Amino acid sequence: MRKRSSSNASRRSSTNRRRSEKLRFDEFGFAVLTKRKDQKLHHRCHEYSYPQLSSLRVKELCELLSYWNGASFICKSQIERFIRMGIPPSLRGRVWKCLLSIDSLKESSDFNYQKCLSEVRGPLVDLGVSEYGILSAIATLSDTQNDLGLNHQQPSSCSDPCYSADDITLFRQIALDLQRSFPTHRSLMGESPEAIEGQAKLFRVLIAYAKYNPQVGYSQGMSYIAAVLLMQLGEEEAFWALTALLDKPRYLAELFDLNLTKVQHQVKVFDQFLKHRKPKLSQHMESVGVLSVHFVMPWFLTLFTSLPCWDSVLAVWDLIFLHGLSAVFRIALTIIELLEPQLMDLHDEGAVLPLLLRVPVDVAQYTVLIPALWDTEVQDWELKCMNSLVMDESHHGSKAEQCEKEQDSLPSQIRGGKEEGNVSAPAEGEKNTEKVAGAKSVLTRVMRLAQRYLLDPMGRQRAEDRSSQTQAKPRQRSPAPGRVFRGRTSTSLTQAQLLHLPCVSPTFRSDPRGRASREAEPTSWWCRGVVVMSL
């Protein structure tokens, strides 16, 4: 029986190998599928439109990389200029190494990549699993995990094995994700020697990072990121590039952790950001039943590798390596803005969500997405404001839950006495007072955030000078109702300071007199550099 099953396995592997040899691959290594069913399943376009740099520009880029200094403003401005023009595929690996400072990170760390791999191979040998056949060992790992998980005990035998239940769980989770990561790329597709080696490399990089940083470990999405890095860099270089991305705060350190709480927080930040930038679209999507977590989390965890045009994916990654986490928000906003006309015409969750998860080729192609991406502005102060709002809301939410628990824990007589003393309904004036107080509290928080992130020392000095000049002049007629807050502004900013804050974002809406426009939705607030709309 075993001979028959082994012969069948060898026959299937030889068939898959011949099938992979007959396939045609594009310039980035993706298989050109001919069957319509496979094309719909993998959603990949093979017609690329990225620009070709002249030989002179390529020579200039090579010279820049040869004397690269990550701390130099000139080097960063020059590399941004080349990223705008388009990085040649042959030089992208060198550009990423420079932007992530891989060499300096490796030299400053005590971690030994090869030594870590030798330590990992011990548990694999005890399990009877090879790194070159990790996909075929998923069933073995699952059985062993179930046996160990029944009693939550370490395996007992005469010679104590050097693996634990956590090791088996880690091996199995990575193996399961390996077969989902770019199954149509030649380095991971099928059972060819190149694919087996590519899968082993990806397994080793992910295992090494999980051992390098146990606090983060391994989570979904890392296999896609590591696979893209291996397409451009060597194995150990890809490991250090993954380390730089996941450990440095300016990159993805605020996205990945063991239980995915960080990425859930960033999804909430983007949800507030989308309500701020696109209030009508955000309201429409909520009415349809599509929440940001449904599509933003896959985008963030895989860094937009689901886009059908691979030249656009690589250009998007260039921008992320240049600007960090803010570029991730910028890319997501750009995609939504390009899809906005189609999204506003759809009124069914079954039509809206697939459009966001499988971005059409006409939107994702290089000549459409990348120019729109460079035209989109996302300021750091915006993200800081949204992050503070989310933190504040979660803090107040936890306080409210605590108060409810304390109220529930009170004796029934006290609760009954309170209820009897407040039988009569509150007056209409009391309701209005509560609404105004709530609006003031929200407004006060927003204005303090605006003051913290918008007013630099020079701008604050100019605002104070203009405020003193305004107070010296006789009082003028108050503006028209609805233009500026009356009685709702925070005590931290005067009216003159509000009217003369520097305009940070080019998309601020104002009339010729510099006062806030009411084009925004009444339920949204604008903190785009000058004033906050009424709630």
Image: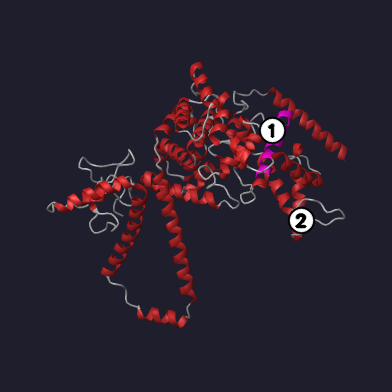
Which residue corresponds to the image point at 51% horizontal and 23% vertical from the top-left? Answer: 61
Instruction: Report x, y in % for residue 296.
Output: 50, 44
Compared to residue 356, the image places residue 93 above or below, namely above
- Work out which residue is located at the far top of the displayed protein and give it: 55
Give coordinates of residue 131: x percent, y percent: 75, 39
Task: Decide whether the magenta segment is chiefly helix, strand or loop.
Answer: helix
For the point 32% across and 39% down, the residue is: 507
Q: Position of residue 259 (x, y in %)?
A: 59, 53
Q: Secondary structure at mark 2?
A: helix
Label 1 sits on what residue type?
Gly
- Give me the residue at 28% from left, 44% from top: 519
Can you identify the residue that label 2 sits on? 148
Q: Magenta includes 197? A: yes
Residue 198: numbered disc? 1
Nearer the N terminus, badge 1 or badge 2? 2
The reply to whether the magenta stretch includes residue 142 is no
Given residues 271 and 103, the one toward you in this image is: 103
Quadrant (top left/top right/bottom left/bottom right) for the C terminus: bottom left
Q: Does any portion of residue 405 appear in the rendered image?
A: yes
For this orientation, the residue located farthest to the left is 474
The answer to whether residue 287 is above or below residue 402 is above
Amino acid tagged 2? Leu
Q: Quadrant of residue 510?
A: top left
Horizontal side of 206 relative to 512 (left or right) equals right
Magenta residues, start to end:
189-209
> In the drawing, does residue 9 fall left or right of residue 326?
right
